[in-house]
Amino acid sequence: MAGKNKVLIANGQGFWGDSILGPIRLVNEGPLDYLTLDYLAEVTLSIMQKLRSRDPSKGYATDFVRLIDRILPQMMEKDIKVIANAGGVNPHACKDALLEVAAKHGVKGLKIAVVEGDDILHRLDDLMAAGESFANMDTGADLSGVRDTVSSANVYMGAFPIAEALDGGAQIVLTGRGTDPGLVLGPMIHEFGWKEDEFDLLAAGTIAGHMVECGAQCTGGNYTDWRKIPDMARIGYPIIEATADGSFTITKHEGTGGLVDVSTVTHQLCYEMGDPNDYLGPDCRADFTSVSLAQDGPDRVRVTGAKGSAPTETLKVSISYHEGWKSSGQLTISGPEALDKARLCADIVWERLAFDGAVYSTEERFEEFVGAGVCHEGIAGGTDSDPAEVILRMGVRGPDRAKVDRFGTELVPLVTSGPPGVTGFAGGRPKATEVIGFWPALMHKRHLETSVSVFES
Amino acid sequence: MTKTTLSRIAMARSGDKGEGSNVGVMARSDAAYAFLKEALTAEVVRAHMASINTGAVTRYEADNVGVLNFILHNSLGGGGSASLKTDAQGKTHGLAVLRLELDIPDEVLASVTE
């Protein structure tokens, strides 16, 4: 497969809900070989399972189909390949929707690959019978305690099935749950023919993938010295110039906003970091402390020296389950004496609820005075200040849906039955929403059954 | 020696990590990193963030990029989707750490450009 000296791989979607402008501008504003897109947060798959159970044609990221509808002509013209975990729990429905988009644009011969094997919800009992405990990685608890309420279970797949799909000529690769860096490592394996035991190279691709997996967080978004970032409105999304020896350069398209320097890239290296010596993944363990970062011209950072080692025998599994209900709402309370009035409002709500028999433990109830030191509670802001207004945020949580719902009925009445200056109730009465618990676990890799299938428009 | 905020000599990024958050603190110079390795211990960060984080704090070092990475083990108000807090993902914890006031040697302050 090796051929090109330099392969351009971008990330255009850092998370579920990221701007559609990122990927649209990436395919329009400069050269690109691969566009990667991440649509899955930890609880997304659980929501998708629910959607699918109600409608068998749902359960994938519909945003992705809308995006392809907008960029398909440029993709075809520039031969840009797209890799996305948009398949969710129903990649074939996603593929079918994409084939319709291709037909609409009159595009024939578009190859779409579906990578499967991450969804183990239907195999969970068999795997438990085969000895997998799926003990919670954080608490050690046994899965059997919540087994009845499990709503999704997905293994984090590695990058090799993505490479296999690209080897098969796919122009769009659809996956479910894989690691975010794998979306970037996959095309490198495909282009450069990296092998499963070339751990330094796999680590390089993993680190590159980590650096760009949150989109514009690598190019000046969410950056400490924010005043130094030019033209944030037109911020460019990150592009990796990958080479076969594992060294790579992070950059962005010329003329876009934002900044790529050692500092913005280091910011992203830190994101969601645990032990920097040992970043665990399905294809390798990567050592973040092995790399050197150097400025290589404006908006270019060169990364060299990545070291990795063999992965563990287990794969991470993301399980979600029903963890109860929660409800929260807010009111704005103006000054004078905004904070004192807001505190009184909160007390009134709890007292009225208790009067009607709805008593919540301190674990179950919650209040915040936004504007008087919430984000940095006890560090900045607080009771000594007299803000012009504060937002009172209150909420409850617990296993009893009716009791959680009861809370919402006593917030808005404060407008007429509390102190003066209470407003901002446009959201109406807060309602109970399901709390989907996240259960991280491990599974031996011998149980993983991936498959790659290719379809053509 | 000047008493001033950590933000003078370091930058930070934070995000959620299970029931807690991680805060990567990036020194603005080699001298600042050498100073912070001594001064910015896990215990100093734990005490500063005690009103937000009720758990332990673990520190990791990445000398190659001048980063001290702190894991705040219980800082999201019940964790994940069950949390009712505004900042249930620890996005602002980096800036909270940067508000820490430290006695910083003048040569360390001088080593930071701008």
Image: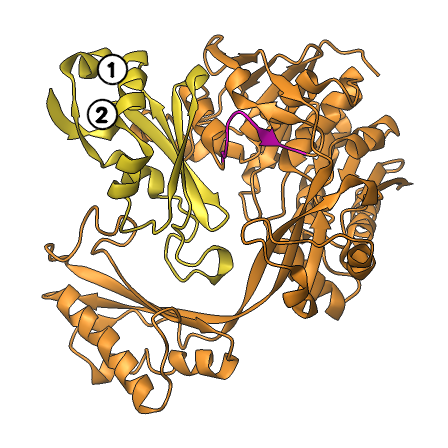
Q: What's the amino acid at mark 2?
A: Arg
Q: What's the amino acid at mark 1?
A: Val
Please report, as a chain letter, where disc 1 is located: B
Magenta highlight on residue A239: no
- In the rendering, at what x and y percent does residue A374 appear? 27, 54
Taking the spot 58% from the left edge, 48% from the top edge, the residue there is A16
The circle drawn on residue A109 is none
Locate the N terminus of chain A by quadrant: top right
Q: Secondary structure at mark 2?
A: helix
Q: Is residue A42 left or right of residue A445?
A: left
The circle drawn on residue B112 is 1
10 Å crowding of disc 1: few (<14), some (14-19), many (20+): some
Check if mark 2's residue and mark 1's residue have beta carbons within 8 Å.
yes
Q: Is residue A100 above or below residue A214?
A: below
- In the rendering, at what x and y percent does residue A436 appear? 57, 63
Magenta highlight on residue A278: yes
Q: Main secondary structure of the magenta part?
A: loop
Locate the C terminus of chain A by quadrant: top right
The magenta-colored residue range is A273-281
The picture's colour for chain B is yellow
The answer to whether residue A31 shows anywhere in this view is: no
- Mark 2 → mark 1, Cα distance in angstroms: 8 Å
Q: Is residue A154 above or below residue A284?
A: below
Q: Is residue A170 above or below residue A430?
A: above
* Picture quadrant of residue A322: bottom right
Q: Which residue is mark 2?
A: B8
Q: Earlier in the sequence, mark 2 or mark 1?
A: 2
The picture's colour for chain A is orange
- In the rendering, at what x and y percent does residue A179 appear? 66, 38
- In the rendering, at what x and y percent does residue B77 appear? 39, 57
Please report, as a chain letter, where disc 2 is located: B
